[in-house]
């Protein structure tokens, strides 16, 4: 099967499985999201001032543009952060990954079909963000084009750079899993001896690398564009914005070219081994001991300590993205606190809303497989109240470490911290309610 045939088959399958008809199409959703962002941007550009002279009008327009630009940047970063974190799900964390790995399909077509999904998702996100910048054109076409350039660069990173990093991380994990399978075959008597290694081998990477490396790459890209975000409103950042954007675009193109040349040989192995890891079958689970923070929390919660320890270790192994995304949220909030922007609320709003949404998601995951086996847990000498308390404590711990502490720092560093504290309080109450009454 060729790449074009597999892409056509995958597209047909997704079209048939799509719910909601045309309304469920990714580009229709992107259009609606873009219009919502545009409405938010437009509302921030509407200011009431008494301006009569050309100089006063120019100042008023500059203020309005800056307000709208800040909102756009916050929305764009949230949209692309979601797009970045979705890349592994387009590549190997898919329901059909195990099936595709067993079919007689070459690694090249498998890789091309996965990259096509990444490209399409990145294009939809870029479209939404570009539409969101449209209201700024009434104030300055030149500066609006800078926003479009930002969106295009982030789109290239989502379509090319993040897939390259994710595939590289998966190849490391898949290779290490293949080596472990060799040891299992020898131990079971299937093979007589191990194949001799061709060179000195480094320690096998943890399966957490599947989410950690893409999360780290996402952080690099987002921090890079934040460093030059003043360019969007006509400012002069310390580093040239066109150079930074060109570097991100160039690295994205070069990385995917290197991946396309080398990854087809291992793409089938990646899909097979990552699928086995994902379902905890025929795989070394690498469930490590609790961390120092987890042990400290466990000492404070009485009979919920044991289920909390189990939940914490399984969440680290099964959902490493929670910690990668949490680290990104922490970093963004700390940057807001240190930089003390003139208008911090758009960035804080977007960050805290995204964090609260993800907090609600992980609160539900704690009550589902593979973290919680309800029927099996009911047979253990642990009360249901202790199990529920353990999950609430895990969510509170995640929120406190990654969101509450840096958000307090960011809010208190602003001249008027009331809005930020109110937003943080609302998000905290929402996440706490979600952990107490999760959607299972």
Image (cartoon, rainbow, N blue to C red):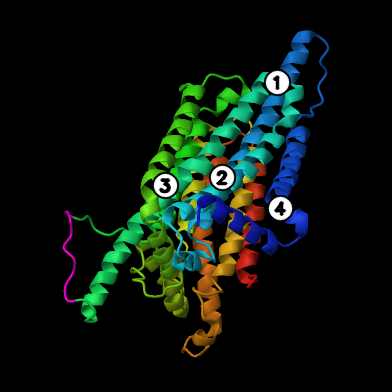
Residue contact between numbered discs 2 and 3, judged by CB atoms under 8 Å: no
Up-down relation of residue 124 to residue 379 (above or below): above
Judge by depth and name the residue closer to the eye, 400 or 127. 127
| Separation (CA) of disc 3 from disc 1 | 35 Å
- Mark 2 neighbour density, 10 Å: few (under 14) some (14–19) many (20 or more): many
- Mark 4 neighbour density, 10 Å: few (under 14) some (14–19) many (20 or more): some
Q: Nearer the viewer, mark 4 or mark 1?
A: 4
Judge by depth and name the residue closer to the eye, 4 or 161. 4
Q: Which residues are magenta?
A: 192-200
Q: Position of residue 257 (x, y in %)?
A: 42, 39
Judge by depth and name the residue closer to the eye, 176 or 314. 176
The quadrant in which residue 128 appears is top right
For residue 25, the mark is 4
Q: Main secondary structure of the magenta part?
A: loop
| Separation (CA) of disc 1 from disc 2 | 27 Å
For residue 165, the mark is 3
Q: SS class of the residue under badge 2?
A: helix
Q: Position of residue 426 (x, y in %)?
A: 67, 54
Left or right: 375 with respect to 308?
right
| Separation (CA) of disc 4 from disc 1 | 30 Å
Residue at x 69%, y 29% (from the top left corner): 67
| Separation (CA) of disc 2 from disc 4 | 15 Å
Task: Find out whether residue 193 is within the magenta segment.
Answer: yes
The quadrant in which residue 41 appears is top right
Q: Position of residue 200 (x, y in %)?
A: 16, 54
Label 4 or label 1, whichever comes before in sequence order: 4
Label 3 or label 4, whichever comes before in sequence order: 4
Res 14 visible:
yes
Which residue is identified by label 2? 119
- Mark 1 neighbour density, 10 Å: few (under 14) some (14–19) many (20 or more): few
| Separation (CA) of disc 3 from disc 4 | 27 Å
For residue 141, the mark is 1
């Amino acid at each position: 099967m060729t790449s074009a045939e597999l892409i056509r088959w995958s597209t047909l399958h997704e079209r048939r499985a799509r719910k909601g008809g045309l309304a469920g199409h990714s580009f229709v959703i992107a259009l609606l999201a873009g219009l919502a962002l545009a409405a938010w941007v437009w509302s921030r550009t509407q200011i009431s001032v008494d301006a009569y002279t050309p100089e006063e009008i120019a100042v008023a327009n500059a203020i309005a543009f800056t307000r709208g630009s800040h909102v756009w940047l916050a929305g764009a970063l949230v949209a692309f952060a979601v797009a970045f974190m979705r890349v592994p799900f387009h590549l190997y964390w898919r329901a059909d990954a195990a099936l595709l790995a067993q079919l007689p399909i070459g690694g090249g077509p498998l890789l091309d079909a996965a990259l096509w999904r990444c490209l399409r998702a990145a294009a939809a996100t870029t479209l939404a963000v570009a539409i969101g910048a449209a209201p700024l054109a009434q104030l300055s076409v030149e500066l609006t084009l800078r926003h479009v350039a930002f969106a295009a660069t982030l789109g290239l990173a989502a379509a090319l750079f993040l897939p390259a990093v994710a595939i590289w991380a998966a190849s490391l994990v898949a290779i290490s899993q293949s080596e472990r399978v060799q040891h299992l075959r020898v131990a079971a008597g299937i093979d007589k001896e191990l194949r001799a290694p061709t060179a000195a081998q480094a320690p096998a990477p943890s399966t957490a690398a599947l989410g950690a490396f893409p999360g780290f790459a996402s952080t690099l890209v987002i921090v890079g564009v934040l460093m030059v975000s003043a360019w969007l409103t006509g400012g002069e950042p310390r580093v040239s914005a066109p150079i930074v954007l060109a570097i991100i675009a160039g690295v994205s193109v070069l990385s995917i070219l290197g991946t396309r040349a080398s990854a087809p040989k291992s793409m089938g192995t990646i899909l097979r081994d990552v699928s086995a890891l994902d379902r905890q079958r025929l795989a070394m689970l690498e469930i490590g001991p609790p961390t120092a923070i987890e042990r400290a929390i466990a000492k404070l919660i009485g009979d919920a300590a044991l289920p909390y320890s189990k939940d914490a270790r399984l969440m680290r192994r099964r959902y490493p993205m929670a910690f990668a995304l949490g680290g990104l949220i922490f970093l963004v909030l700390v940057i807001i606190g240190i930089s003390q922007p003139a208008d911090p609320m758009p960035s804080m709003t977007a960050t805290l809303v995204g964090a609260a949404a993800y907090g609600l998601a992980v609160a539900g995951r704690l009550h589902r497989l593979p973290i919680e086996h309800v029927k099996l847990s009911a047979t253990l000498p642990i009360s249901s109240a202790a199990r529920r308390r353990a999950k609430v404590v895990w969510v509170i711990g995640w929120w406190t470490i990654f969101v509450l502490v840096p958000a307090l720092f960011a809010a208190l560093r602003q001249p008027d911290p009331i809005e930020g504290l109110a937003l943080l309080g609302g998000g905290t109450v929402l996440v706490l309610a979600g952990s107490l009454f999760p959607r299972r």
